[in-house]
Image: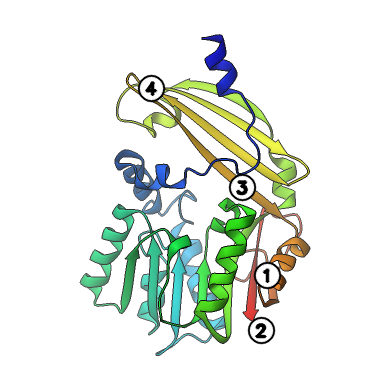
């Protein structure tokens, strides 16, 4: 038992393990995540409905979205951005590896007769002959990727965009990193049964990596017949660090904002957003 507890509290190297699929493709947790997506009153999985509406309006105006405008929405979830942007005439491709989210999004698109192509796939592996005017990656998905994955996805964006095309994404700030607190908690049926429909014991270890500006929420879920671990990595950025990654991939930063609704940049906010244009 002592050795098992030692293992639970052991600090891994930054981005040593990658378990994103465990969260989004497991039958139980993917259903939980979809319910969070569709709860318009909270900021879990997706932003709240009011914010999304404001964000869509700003995106549509800022990028002059209309007919023949092509958008790739990486990590599209149940289409909360894809659908309203398609209603403004854009041809949208949404990529997500959650079966539940994609099925829900397809049902909405069919019912509302929207021009959206949904792809159930890990967006790190997505390839297409299409070329886009705008790539979206919203809800700080970029922060969950390792340095190698981020380099790869930015190169992918560059190849998928038309000349002069843009990327819009948001990230967590260094101010948010400073507010993050290390700790360890334990709870029966942690997060109100989020991890399993059956009884389980849940451990949450939060680690901070000061040099790398990375944080980890490490969940260990112990059920009667299995033990599993889920790693929620987050990279935190300064505007200069994010700009450096984009510049190396062939982009220049066109705009810096507090969020993906175009709010003026505030260095004290937990997040910020960038518009980067393909060189």
Residue of label 3: 234
User: Is disc 3 placed on a helix, strand or loop?
Assistant: strand
Which of marks 2 and 4 precedes in the sequence? 4
User: Is disc 4 placed on a helix, strand or loop?
Assistant: loop
Which of marks 4 and 1 precedes in the sequence? 4
Q: Quadrant of residue 29?
A: top left
Residue of label 4: 200
Q: Quadrant of residue 9?
A: top right
Q: CA distance from mark 4 to mark 2?
A: 51 Å
Residue of label 1: 246
Q: CA distance from mark 4 to mark 3?
A: 25 Å
User: Is disc 1 placed on a helix, strand or loop?
Assistant: helix
Asked if the residue under mark 1 is in contact with the one under mark 2, i.e. CB atoms within 8 Å, the reply is no
Identify the residue at horizontal 69%, vertical 48% (top origin): 176
Few, some or many C-alpha atoms within 10 Å of disc 2 (few <14, some 14-19, many ≥20)? some
Closer to viewer: mark 2 or mark 3: 2
In the displayed structure, would residue 226 be above or below residue 117? above
């Amino acid at each position: 038992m002592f050795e098992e507890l030692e293992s639970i509290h052991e600090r891994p190297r930054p981005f040593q393990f990658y378990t994103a699929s465990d969260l989004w493709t497991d039958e139980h947790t993917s259903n939980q995540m979809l319910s969070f997506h569709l709860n318009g009153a909270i900021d879990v999985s997706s932003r709240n409905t009011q914010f999304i509406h404001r964000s869509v309006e700003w995106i549509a105006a800022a990028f002059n979205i209309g007919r023949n405008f092509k958008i790739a929405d990486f990590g599209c979830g149940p289409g909360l951005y894809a659908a309203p942007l398609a209603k403004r005439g854009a041809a949208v491709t949404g990529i997500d590896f959650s079966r539940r989210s994609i099925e829900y999004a397809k049902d909405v698109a069919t019912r509302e007769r929207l021009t959206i192509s949904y792809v159930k796939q890990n967006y790190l592996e997505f390839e297409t002959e299409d070329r886009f005017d705008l790539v979206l990656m919203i809800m700080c998905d970029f922060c969950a990727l390792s340095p190698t994955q981020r380099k790869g996805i930015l190169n992918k964006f560059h190849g998928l965009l038309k000349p002069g095309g843009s990327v819009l994404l948001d990230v967590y700030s260094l101010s948010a990193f400073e507010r993050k607190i290390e700790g360890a908690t334990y709870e029966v049926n942690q997060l109100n049964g989020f991890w399993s429909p059956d009884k389980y014991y849940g451990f949450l270890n939060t680690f901070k990596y000061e040099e790398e500006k990375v944080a980890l929420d490490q969940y260990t879920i112990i059920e009667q017949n299995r033990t599993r671990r889920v790693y929620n990595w987050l990279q935190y950025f300064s505007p200069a660090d994010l700009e450096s990654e984009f510049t190396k991939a062939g982009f220049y930063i066109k705009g810096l904002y507090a969020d993906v609704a175009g709010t003026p940049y505030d260095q004290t906010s937990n997040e910020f957003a960038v518009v980067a244009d393909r060189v």
